[in-house]
Each structure stands twice: as C-alpha cells, then as structure tokens.
C-alpha cells in the first residue's frame, strides 16, 4: 500500500473509493483489499448517509436533553422538543422551548445556548436530513493517470475493465494509454462468444447486406454477467468462417475476404482473391499475424482453389492493395505465435516455421513422430505456454474414457521430438470443438479463481463450458461433448474464446 502514497493517498488504515455509478468501484476495492490482505467492507451510500444522520441526530438530541435536564422543573417538555428535533423541525423545537420555559433565567441561558448551536450548524452547512446525491461527488474524473493504471493492473476480468473504460473521457483516455494492455491478454481469462440459435434471438442484416446473428458473451469469472454482440450469420452459406485472431473474425465469400471486429462490427475488406477462387473454395485456416492496427499485420489464408486440388498459402499485408503470390503447401489447419515465430501445423500434425517477410515460405520442423503410423495424437491442437510449445491430444485411456494429455516440443537435438508432460505449469488452457477457433493459454489463473494445469473446453450446448485436468487418470466420459471438428468447413461459427481487439491497440 505504500506505493499509493506517491499519489497523495495514505492507505495504512483504509480508504474510501468513490465515483459515478457503474465504474467498477466495488470490483476495484475488492481486488485492492485482496492484494493488501486486508478486510473489505462494502457499504452503500444510502446506508452511509443513514448512519451519519442517525449519529448526528443522536448527538443533537442528547445535547438538547442535557440542556433541558439542567433546567429544573421543566423536564415534562423534554419529550415534545425531542420529537420535533427528530423530525428535523429545529426552529419549531426552539419556539416550543421558549414558550414552555418562559422567562426562567436559567432556562433563557440554556435556550440561547441551544440557539447558538443550531446557528453554527446552519452556517457550517451541516444537515441532518439532506442526502448528498451521487452526481454531486467531485474529483473522481480528475484522478491521476498513474493511479488509474494501478487500478487496472489489479482487475481480474474484462467484465471489470469494460465499465472502467466507459466511465468518462479521462478514464477512457487512461485506459487507452495503459502500456500493459496487451500483457493482460494471457493473464486475464478470455471471453466466450456463444452464437444463439435462430429461435432464441431474431437475426438482422448488417451494413454489408449479410445476416447478423446475436451472440452471448460470457466470462468465466463473472458468470452471472452476460454481454451481447452480433457477428455475421454463416448459416445461409453466404459467408464461410476461416478463423479468428486478435479479436477479429475472418470470413470468406467467394473471392471476397472480410476481417470483422467481434464486438464493434468494424470491417476491413481485403483485395479480391485470385479469379481461380470459386464460390465454394475450401478455406482451412485464416489467421492474422498481428493486430490489424499494427503496421506488421498480415492476413494468412490456406485455401484450395478447387474441391479436389492442392492447397495454397496466401498472405495480404493489411492495408496494401494486393495479395502475395500464392505458394503450394500442405493443408494448414493451425498457425500460432511462439517465441517470436509463426508455427504452422498441417493436417498430418507436422510442424513448420512460417515466414511472411521478406518472402512467404514454410520450413518444416523435422520430428520423430512425423512418420509414425498410427499417429500418437488424437484431435490435437497447439498452444504456447510461455516458453513451452505444447500439443494437447484427446486420448482414450484404459477405462475407455477421454483424457487430455500434453506433449511439449523438445528441439535440443537435430531431430525434434514430443515429450509427454503431466503438467503444463502455471497455465489454464482454453479450447473448443473447432480447429479454426483460437486456442489460448492464461498464466497464473489463481488470480481470478482458476486452476492451473486444466483445460476449459467450450461447448455448443449446455453447459457453456467444462473444466478438465490435464492427464487426469479418472478420465472424461465419452458422452461429455468433447467432439472436435477439423473438416466441417461450411458450418456456422461455433462458440469460441476471444480477447477483445481494444486490448491490442
């Protein structure tokens, strides 16, 4: 807490956090109290005012009682005067005292003393019955930017950050200038975007003429708080979902390719693809190499120009006027960032280092399992856990139950190999049932109440997700809904995990 003293705030005994409605005061206070290992007390302003009024009224009543008791023989009028004081009728109480106490010298002295007390209270602006409205509170909009940044670093979810960033212009500016925003991705848990069924929510048309589907946005930390967004409706076959990265959806429509912000709907239109691309071209992977606001951002597509033909890899430098020349490649199913490189995985689970500049290319990472028959992996997916590249496989154990097993890539020798590990460290992994959706790792899950070495798996039905320990010997029932799609390229967008794009700007 001493670090806050630089802002002129002494938190040794405690502090009061105030601000406008909906700015996340309670959430911030909880996090600060937890970090400090101290007690958190939540009192609404109505209760505070009631307690203060009661305390001040009690002091006033006791004072008047004492005055009247000192006036011998006039105690019968104490009750009436006290009732008037409790109802806030100060002047009326004074008149009654004057009339009832008459001209008794001692009474006159005490009456004048009581009148002086009331006069001082009015001059100082003290009030027993007036409630200070929330809108009259001043100063919260002028808090130092450094102090606001320190609050942001203590928040445990994006649902807490959203009201913070929308409080006022100064808080929004502090949020935008927060240098550690990208670092929060990978520390805070991602949000789950879950498209609603047609009968659950009516769909609309977007500005581009494509249908929009309403989606429920869920947070594993604040499960009772639900947000909403709209994404393109792919059920009518007009758009094909190619992938998601950096808070963007990548969709293909014939020769057109669109990059859409999941939450704002802002759309970037890439140049038209080659004329050989037909309406039903197979797109197996679409990914961004960096946020769209970055000058180094490229859009990558693995696409087959014909139904039975080979695959090609294309790249578009976001903002440029053309695609790079396509190169022949195996079917690429997944591309992730790891240690400053792009790692691609093909349909046969082989790995490649993917380069975009100065030239588009793939260099295979030779491993011992490349020629294994049968392959040791079942419906695998890649994820980066800090400095460890992990392949997660959904295997079948001896009890005929599913279990998630993890393998890390060891490149210490010329021939790389996958080593099975029972623990992926201080990480929680987020996955779903479609290879096109991002697979994410969240470090230090204990901060927000999660468990390390677990997979949080998104479902299409209920429940919205399930949590499973890696290498759990008890296994997972085969009916638990852990199917994994790798070849359903024209279905609607599944439930997927996402970090909002504003965290990368």
Image (tube, grey):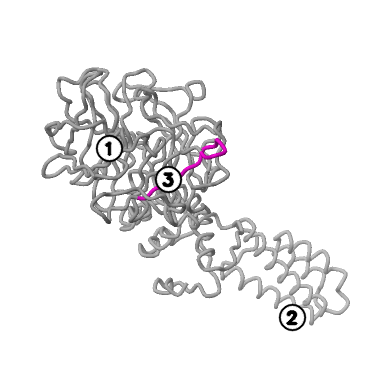
When asked about the image quadrant of residue 236, the answer is: top left
Does residue 268 appear to the left or right of 11 in the view shown?
left
Which of the two discs, 3 and 2, sits closer to the camera? 3
Q: What x and y, as percent, mark residue 392?
A: 41, 43
Label located before the other in sequence (3 or 2)? 2
Give coordinates of residue 238: x percent, y percent. Answer: 31, 19
Give the magenta range. Answer: 397-408
Indicate left or right for 442 with 354 as reference.
right
Q: Any mark on residue 190, and which? A: 3
Labelled pair 2, 1 in contact (Cβ < 8 Å):
no
Q: Which residue is mark 2?
A: 109
Above or below, 159 against 32 in this view is above
Image location (x, y in percent) of residue 210: 33, 22
The mark nearer the N terminus, 2 or 1, is 2
Q: Which residue is mark 1?
A: 287
Spatial separation of the CA atoms under disc 3 and disc 1: 18 Å
Q: Residue at x 77, y 77 (%)?
A: 67
State how far apart marks 2 and 1 are (Cα): 86 Å
- Residue 283, by quadrant, is top left
Q: Secondary structure at mark 2?
A: helix
Q: Is residue 138 magenta?
A: no
The label shown at residue 17 is: none
Between 442 and 67, the one lying in front of the other is 442
């Amino acid at each position: 807490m001493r670090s806050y003293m630089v802002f002129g705030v002494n938190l040794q005994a405690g502090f009061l956090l105030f601000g406008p409605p909906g700015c996340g005061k309670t959430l911030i206070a909880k996090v600060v109290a937890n970090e400090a290992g101290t007690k958190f007390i939540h009192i609404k302003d109505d209760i505070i005012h009631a307690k203060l009024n009661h305390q001040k009224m009690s002091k006033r009543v006791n004072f008047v009682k004492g005055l009247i008791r000192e006036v011998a023989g006039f105690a019968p009028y104490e009750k009436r005067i006290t009732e008037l004081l409790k109802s806030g009728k100060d002047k009326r109480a004074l008149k009654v005292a004057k009339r009832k106490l008459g001209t008794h010298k001692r009474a006159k002295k005490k009456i004048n003393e009581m009148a002086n007390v009331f006069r001082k209270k009015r001059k100082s602006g003290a009030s027993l019955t007036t409630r200070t409205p929330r809108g009259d509170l001043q100063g919260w909009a002028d808090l130092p930017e450094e102090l606001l940044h320190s609050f942001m670093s203590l928040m445990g979810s994006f649902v807490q950050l959203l009201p913070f960033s929308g409080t006022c212009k100064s808080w929004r500016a502090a949020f935008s200038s927060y240098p550690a925003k990208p670092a929060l991705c990978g520390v805070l848990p991602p949000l789950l975007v879950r498209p609603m069924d047609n009968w659950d929510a009516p769909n609309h048309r977007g500005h581009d003429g494509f249908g929009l589907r309403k989606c429920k946005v869920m947070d594993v930390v604040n499960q009772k708080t639900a947000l909403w967004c709209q994404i393109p409706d792919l059920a009518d076959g007009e758009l094909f979902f190619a992938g998601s990265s950096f808070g963007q959806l990548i969709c293909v429509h014939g020769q057109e390719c669109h990059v859409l912000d999941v939450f704002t709907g802002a759309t970037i239109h890439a140049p038209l693809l080659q004329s050989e691309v037909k309406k039903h071209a197979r797109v197996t992977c679409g990914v961004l190499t960096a946020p769209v606001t970055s000058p180094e951002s490229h859009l990558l597509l693995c696409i087959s120009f014909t139904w039975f033909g080979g695959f090609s890899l294309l790249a578009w430098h976001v903002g440029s006027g053309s695609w790079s020349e396509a190169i022949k490649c195996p079917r690429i199913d997944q591309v992730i960032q790891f240690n400053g490189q792009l790692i691609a995985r093909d349909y046969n689970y082989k790995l490649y280092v993917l380069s975009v500049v100065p030239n588009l290319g793939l260099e295979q990472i030779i491993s011992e399992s490349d020629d294994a028959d049968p392959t040791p992996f079942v419906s695998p997916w890649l994820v980066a856990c800090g400095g460890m590249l992990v392949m997660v496989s959904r295997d079948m154990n001896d009890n005929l139950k599913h279990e998630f097993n993890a393998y890390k890539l060891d490149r210490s020798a010329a021939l790389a190999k996958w080593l099975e590990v029972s623990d992926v460290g201080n990480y929680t992994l987020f996955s779903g049932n479609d290879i096109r959706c991002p697979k994410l790792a969240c470090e230090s899950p204990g901060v927000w109440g999660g468990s390390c070495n677990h997979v949080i798996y998104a479902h299409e039905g209920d429940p919205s997700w399930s949590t499973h320990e890696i290498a759990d010997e008890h296994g997972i029932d085969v009916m638990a809904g852990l199917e994994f799609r790798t070849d359903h390229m024209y279905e609607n967008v599944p439930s997927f995990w996402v970090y909002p794009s504003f965290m990368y700007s």
